[in-house]
Amino acid sequence: MEALESFLRENNITEIESTIPDMTGNARGKFYPTRKFLAEESGRIPEAILVQTVTGDWADNHDELVHTSDRDMILVPDLSTLRLVPWADEPTAQIINDCYDAEGNVHPLSTRGILRRVLNLYKEAGLSPIIAPEVEFYLLQRNLDPDYELKSAIGRSGRRETARQSYSIDAVNEFNPIIDTLYSYCDTQGLDVDTLIHESGAAQMEINFLHGDPMNLADQVFAFKRTLRETALKHDIYATFMAKPMEHEPGSSMHIHQSLIDNKTGNNVFAGENGNYSKTFYHFMGGLQRYVPYAISFFAPNVNSYRRFVPDISAPVNMHWGIDNRTTGLRSPASDPAATRIENRFPGADSNPYLAIALSLACGYLGMKEKIEPLAPVEGMSFSPGDKIEVARTLVEGLQLLDECEPLKDILGERFVKAYIGVKTAEFETFNQVISSWEREHLLLNV
């Protein structure tokens, strides 16, 4: 508590954003005057916000998931997440909370709690996961009418990109003022961002995080998304993590690199002898191949997410894996043995980082537990014309697969899975009420 008070005093903090990540990965919470925040050991907020949809509605099975009296849950601040809010007009700090129920247990619907639940399984096995996320995003022209198609932002030259600019230095320099502000904000918050590159889409970028503890990195991605949006608004543009914001541009992903450290030896257990892969590596990979299809609704959590899965090298469409092969959904990058890792390329940028990381690790855990052998690695293109797309094509299909998977439900908890399916089903039903321009164009006078 002394360290907290010292931080707030040294930075002249007058206001605190007390936050939690909801089911969709959005920040919910309260603003506190500093004095009020310090006077309370814990905060309170209605537990029902954990079953709120991205549209602000509620899961249809709301009354089965949270108490019918709409009672509060208890928020306990995690002091390791204390950061400044560099875009605020007044000196402001932000902090992320853990959620507990009235009986003092970790709330079963807390997405941060779900990641902690998975990490505890690894702790019991004497292992520590190490992850590194790569987050893609688009910079867009401001759009005040959702009926209009989105357009990429215009850089300092005054012209839009008209050709693929993968890894272009000059294309990134087009947005130098925005990038400079972004790095400044990240530095102020202690976010461990590493490299930034231009991706293949128009005004599409990717930022990589340094590898580390999964909870810490999930917190950082959660904070980064808010940071980037605020940065863009400061420069009069939008930033989006939609999986597929524009029809003729590639989608945006959040690739997750993962490895496992033996807590006793400190060694990477994915590395075998003589530079080969270990049995643990193969079983982890086998678990991903078997269970990612059932977990796909966490990696593709929105109705728009499934537009990203198209037969193209930019997004995975089957369960193949390969060695340094970016056409596969599961990839082992070329590296020295100590850095042996598996890259899960299925999560979209629109994923809740806590759930995407938790489910990727859960799939691998089941592979190790069940000793699942993977298929042979694929060389060359992993998809040919005429091949079947193996991933779910809609959110409803993804949720049905999740509901069928008892091993994942055992890890996540029955109540959480019901809540997740309830929230996402409600989002789909809201979407399904909208008549699209495609329907008006092709069906109005032709059927």
Image (cartoon, rainbow, N blue to C red):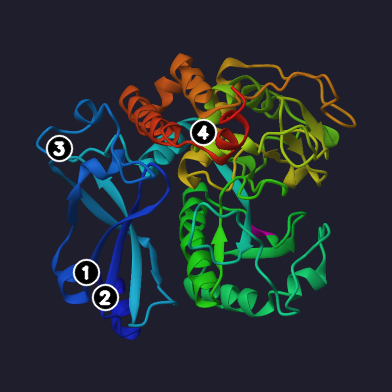
The reply, left or right, for residue 176 in relation to residue 226 is: right
Q: How crowded is mark 3: few (under 14 residues within 10 Å), some or many (20 or more)?
A: few
Q: Name the residue under label 2.
A: 15
The reply, left or right, for residue 435 in relation to residue 239 is: left
Disc 4 marks a residue whose amino acid type is Leu
Q: What element carries label 1?
A: strand
Q: Residue at x 78, y 69 (%)?
A: 171
Q: Mark 3 points at which residue?
A: 103
Magenta segment's dominant SS is strand
Q: In the rendered structure, which segment of residues is drawn in magenta?
A: 205-209
Which one is in front, 4 or 195? 195
Q: Which residue is drawn at 43% across and 40% down?
A: 115
Q: Are marks 2 and 3 in contact (CB under 8 Å)?
A: no
Q: Do the residues labelled 1 and 4 touch (CB within 8 Å)?
A: no
Residue 343 screen position, x and y as percent: 69, 40
Q: Which of marks 3 and 4 is nearer the N terminus?
A: 3
Q: Name the residue under label 1.
A: 32
Disc 1 marks a residue whose amino acid type is Tyr
Q: Mark 4 points at which residue?
A: 359
Res 276 label: none
Alpha carbon separation for disc pair 2 and 3: 30 Å
Q: Is mark 2 on a helix, strand or loop?
A: strand
Q: How crowded is mark 4: few (under 14 residues within 10 Å), some or many (20 or more)?
A: many
Identify the residue at the far right of this view.
Answer: 380
Disc 3 marks a residue whose amino acid type is Glu
Q: Do the residues labelled 2 and 1 touch (CB within 8 Å)?
A: yes
Q: What element carries label 3?
A: loop
Relative to residue 198, is residue 273 depicted above or below?
above
